[in-house]
Image (cartoon, rainbow, N blue to C red):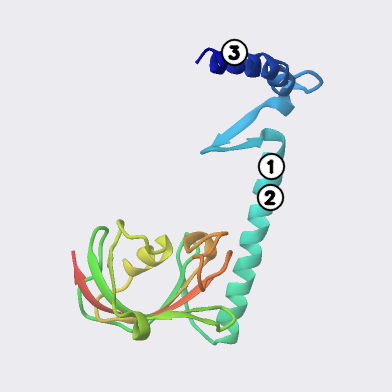
Amino acid sequence: MRKLSHSLLKLVICAIPFIYACGGSEGTSEAETEVIYSGNDQINSKDKESLIDRNKKMILLEQEKIDSFISKSNLKMEKTKTGIHYSIEKLGKGEQPKNLAEVELKYKIHLLNGDYCYSSDSSGVMQIKIGQSNEPTGLQEALQLIPCGSIATIIIPSYLAYGISGDGNKIGGQASLVYNIELLKVKN
């Protein structure tokens, strides 16, 4: 036990110079050392503007791709303030889902380039509790715009779908999704 304590003491004494060397702020200005904390990530305030600008450019580029898809597909769609596009092909006469509603829907999901991702034909009917589901927030938001019994097309930008990382399977990062849905049941 004494050997272990002695070894730990040596380790601490050797580590002290490294700790001070890494933690010092000599040679940097106050503006450069200001850090913005976001979860476990740290971003220098100097780089914050650059990140915001890049994010805005990515969103604009994605919106251009969505607009091009809508135009080429001859779709007439409504657009929400958050960036979701939707079109109701057949208007249902049922109840419109609210937050925390339990819904069932048939669906087909594909990318803007037409690549197939998922469908209820192979995965079964989707059941969601709006506001408490792992499904994309964009889908949950869009479902609240559509009465039960409706058939609709919904385009969800990546930032309301699976973001920059994708779903780890068929949906890559920064992918806009096209949902063709039929809203079967609503329980508010």
Left or right for 176, reference 97: right
**Disc 1 packing (10 Å; few <14; some 14–19; many ≥20):** few
Question: Which numbered disc, 3 or 1, marks the residue that appears first in the sequence?
Answer: 3
Tell me how far mark 2 sits from mark 3, CA to CA: 53 Å
Q: Is residue 89 visible?
A: no
From the top left corner, tell me how far across and down residue 86 is, in percent: 43, 74
Q: Is residue 158 visible?
A: yes
In the rendered structure, which amino acid carries the disc numbered 2?
Asp
In the rendered structure, which amino acid carries the disc numbered 1?
Glu
For label 1, the residue is: 49
Which residue reaches farthest right?
Answer: 27
Residue shown at the point (61%, 17%) measured from the top left: 7
Foreground: disc 2 or disc 3: 3
For label 3, the residue is: 6
So how many labels did they put on this image? 3
Residue 58 against residue 94 in the figure, above or below: above
For the residue labelled by badge 2, is the local secondary structure a helix, a strand or a loop? helix
Residue shown at the point (53%, 64%) measured from the top left: 166
Left or right for 101, reference 3: left
Residue contact at pointers 2 and 1, CB within 8 angstroms: yes
